Image: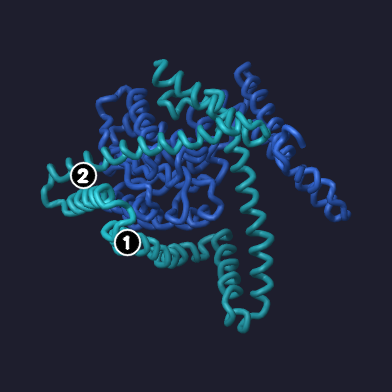
Amino acid sequence: MGIFVEGRVFDLITLVVATGLMGLYMYKARQGMKVTIRPIAGFAAIDEAIGRAAEMGKPVHFTPGFGGLVAATFAGLEVLGYVARLAAQYDVRLVVTVSQAETFAVTEQVMRQAYLEAGKPEAFRPEDCRFISTDQWAYASGVIGVLYREKVASNIMIGQFAAEALILAEAGNTVGAIQIAGTTNAYQIPFFVVACDYVVLGEEMFAAGAHFTNNVVHLGSLRAEDLVKAGCIAIMALGAVLSTLGTDFLTTLMGK
Amino acid sequence: MFLRKTLPTIIAGVCGVVVVIAYFFSIPPVQTLASHILKWQSVIAVFALGLGGVNIVRLHTKNLQRDPKNIYSLALLITFVVTIVVGLAMGQTSPAYTFIFDYINVPTGSAIFSLLAFYIGTAAYRAFRAKNAEAAILLITGCIVMLGRVPIGAKILPFTAPATDWIMSVLNVGGQRGVMIAGAIGFIAVSLRIIVGLERRAYGGE
């Protein structure tokens, strides 16, 4: 294969096509192409969650999960920016818990910026952005403690979650908080579905930027993502047909 | 502005491109550089851990100043300091440090993990109520899978074992793969926006 790493050529072509489409549609969106997105119930409920906390005079809890600086965490931080702005506007205390040290520094910066954008930089309390632990179960117990001690009115969990997901969601349910959760981890989504009031399912998380800010770059990127998904579905259908006909042409091509 | 936003954007972009090139192309200098970048990532993460440690000490010291009877903050600070002192003074393989890890850290972690069993029960109790059509489908499917997964279930209702296999290998896998593929495409989009500097939220931008 020479210059290419064996077994990754098809992956490279797919990445180049996906990246090209995303670049093209981001450009088109900047040039004024209209892109609309469907309402996402989980995001729409955030206003209700903050409003509830304002009425009850209790804090809101947010956590971007157990992941480091991965794409799901960035999506969670996008939501955090909106939540923090809204919390600042309504004078609601926002408590944020973080499990990874590198995420902590970024999270604090996102909160600080959101309070600044809301015109209330003085309302930001650094002690409300809390690093808990990089240990999964220490993080879970720390968040449970925050939920119980702060008696939160709303619990928002959007980011990367693993086995601690249900523990956090059930603790939030026990304190009677309205709960909005979202993750791309397919194994944890069912837990959130049964334990939370609203769930942002997998890829919907990545629409956060487009949903909250109508950012044209995000909207263009979403349009491209839909096209790539359509391409994936077409390849899967073609693969099913070819496999039924007894040819392994596509699997051989994808293994190159 | 340059140091806070522009420079991090440039560094993230360059590092991202190098690591992607090293993954797909067999170019030894680029692959060496990529492995260095991944090592630097670990080093930077350790510095960030220091920031996290400072946050923990600051927060719980304030808690104690406000309420000297706050035994949780006191316990945390004591264990925090003891673990660091033992680790630094005696080493991570010393009997004292191993004792802290094996007899305090591991059992407390296991205790929290074990809560999952009880929470699955309470969550299932709430979820498995046929309030509407979707909840009824969840209830029926859940009952079939639970019966099909235990030997006595297949004895009582023999159809549950093959039905469980079908539910798990067709419906469940299909749904999960849909979530995974769509999630992966979203990952690519976010990563691309970070590499080209359009995902400014991470640097405190809009």
Residue B99: name its quadrant.
Answer: bottom left
Q: Which of A147 and A1 is in front in this view?
A: A1
Residue B12 horizontal side relative to residue B162, left or right: left
Give me the residue at 40% from left, 52% from top: A136
The percent position of residue A201, horizontal first and vertical second, equals 54, 46
**Residue A221 seen by the camera:** yes
Chain B in the picture: what colour? cyan
Q: Which amino acid does label 1 sit on?
A: Thr
Which quadrant: the C terminus of chain B?
top left
Q: Does dot 1 land on a helix, a strand or a loop?
A: helix
What is the number of the mark on residue B60? Answer: 2
Image height check: is A143 above or below A20?
A: below
Q: Quadrant of residue B110?
A: bottom left
Q: Residues within 10 Å of mark 2 (few under 14, many from 20)?
A: some
Q: Which residue is identified by label 1? A: B108
**In this rendering, would B121 be left or right of A125?**
right
